[in-house]
Image (spheres, rainbow, N blue to C red):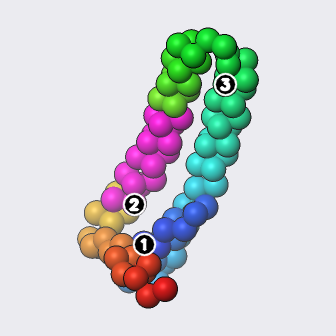
Amino acid sequence: MGIDTNEKSLDCATSNGDPFRYDLSELSGIHHTYFERRRKIQRKFWGDRRKSQKLQAKYRRREKRRTEQLMHLVSKDIVKKARENMFGIVLEKLEYMGKFK
């Protein structure tokens, strides 16, 4: 099973020729939502640094948990499909991508 990661999707192909895709556009939506919330906090509590930092940390943790949960569900499903069909998992190798500029 080959896996290609993109900004808004995770594309998989099996040796059977069965392609499937996971939509990850929700990740950018989560990031944008929490970016806006942290921006509002910064504006509202600009004079109270302690309160601002505390609230920003709270929303940072929420964003992290939501993204980790989404990625966990996707990876869990990929491993399940690979086990059911006795496939190995191969990821793209980007090790040398930036060295040829």
First-in-chain label (3 vs 2): 3
Tell me the distance, in whole angstroms, between the alpha carbons under discs 1 and 2: 9 Å
The residue located at (66%, 13%) in the rendering is: 47
First-in-chain label (1 vs 3): 1
First-in-chain label (1 vs 2): 1
Residue 82, position as x, y percentages in the image = 33, 66
Dot 2 crowding, Cα within 10 Å, few <14, some 14–19, many 20+ = some
Residue 37, position as x, y percentages in the image = 68, 29
The secondary structure type at the circle numbered 3 is helix
Tell me the distance, in whole angstroms, between the alpha carbons under discs 3 and 2: 39 Å
Q: Is residue 76 above or below residue 39?
A: below
Task: Tell me the number on the disc at residue 62.
Answer: none
Looking at the picture, tell me which residue is in the foreground, 56 or 64: 56
The secondary structure type at the circle numbered 1 is strand
Looking at the picture, tell me which residue is in the foreground, 37 or 45: 45
Report the predominant secondary structure element of the magenta stretch.
helix
Q: Is residue 41 left or right of residue 77?
A: right
Looking at the picture, tell me which residue is in the foreground, 22 or 98: 98
- Which residue is under mark 2? 78
The residue located at (69%, 31%) in the rendering is: 39
- Which residue is under mark 1? 3
The residue located at (67%, 43%) in the rendering is: 32
Q: Write down the region rendered in magenta.
A: 62-79
Which residue type does callout 3 highlight?
Gln
Tell me the distance, in whole angstroms, between the alpha carbons under discs 1 and 3: 39 Å
The secondary structure type at the circle numbered 2 is helix
Residue 97 seen anywhere in this rendered image of the structure: yes
The residue located at (62%, 41%) in the rendering is: 30
Can you tell which quarter of the image residue 55 is in? top right
Q: Residue furthest bottom?
A: 100
Q: Is residue 89 above or below residue 22?
A: below
